[in-house]
Image (tube, rainbow, N blue to C red):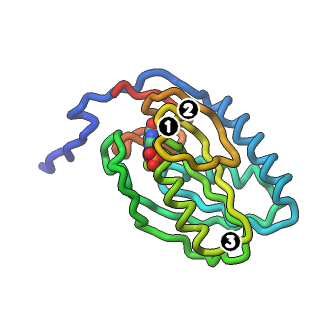
Amino acid sequence: MQEEESSPIKEQKLELGSVMLSREEIDRRVSEIAAEIAEDYRGQELIVVCVLKGAAIFMVDLVRKIGDAVDVRMDFMAVSSYGDSSTSSGVVKIVKDIDSYPEGKNVLLVEDIMDSGLTLYYLRDVLMAKNPKSFRTCVLLEKPERKKVSTEIDYKGFTIPDKFVVGYGLDCAGQWRHLPDIWSVDV
Ligand code: IMP
Ligand code: MG
């Protein structure tokens, strides 16, 4: 018989705390941000870059709500910084770069959460080096108490307290990304 994979969650006995943001609150806010983006880029091409995997659910909801006022192109990046730990290693590495050529184009980077700000700070540099016509950031959650470096967020969903959160794409060691609401985790 195959042995069950060992899971850091089980070992640490982490448990879901309570719902911090309900699916209805998230849906309302994502609609508002999408309307703003649709207005700002009306009639233009926009490369929306999702930072995998955490921003995937946010990004697909967002682009569907932006609608046909904008010529949206989807692209994806993957970075590693956290591993399976809930505290940052402080090291950001690009695991997958975008496929498109953003030179002379509008780029919108979509991220799930800004914690220390290191990931966003680093990705801004990487994408700016590709000479886009414009570059903006869209971040669902910001934890201002944990900020180490300052990077501007152009479209922000919610400001949250210093709690580890999961759901709506966000995970803890791969778990709980699929939950429709955003929960705090008792670490
Ligand atoms: P930063 O570089 O410290 O700003 O970290 C950003 C990345 O850390 C995000 O893309 C998330 O993957 C991860 N992260 C930070 N806080 C949380 C959290 O509360 N839940 C899940 N992932 C988080
Ligand atoms: Mg992540």
Instruction: Give whichever of discs 2 and 3 has the lower sequence position.
Output: 3
Task: Give neighbour class at mark 1: few <14, some 14-19, many 20+ (Cα, 10 Å).
Answer: many
Pinpoint residue 42: horizontal percent, then vertical percent: 86, 60
Could you tell me the amino acid type at mark 2?
Asp
The amino acid at mark 3 is Pro
- Report the Cα–Cα distance between label 2 and label 3: 34 Å
Q: Position of 5 compared to 114: left or right?
A: left
Sequence-wise first label, 2 or 1: 1
The secondary element bearing badge 3 is classed as: loop
Q: Which residue is mark 3?
A: 132
Residue 180 location (% of width, % of height): 56, 36
Spatial distance from mark 3 to mark 1, Cα to Cα? 32 Å
Left or right of residue 147, residue 139 in this image:
right
Q: Which residue is mark 1?
A: 167
Mark 2 element type: loop
Mark toward the viewer: 3 or 1? 3
Label 2, on which residue?
Answer: 181
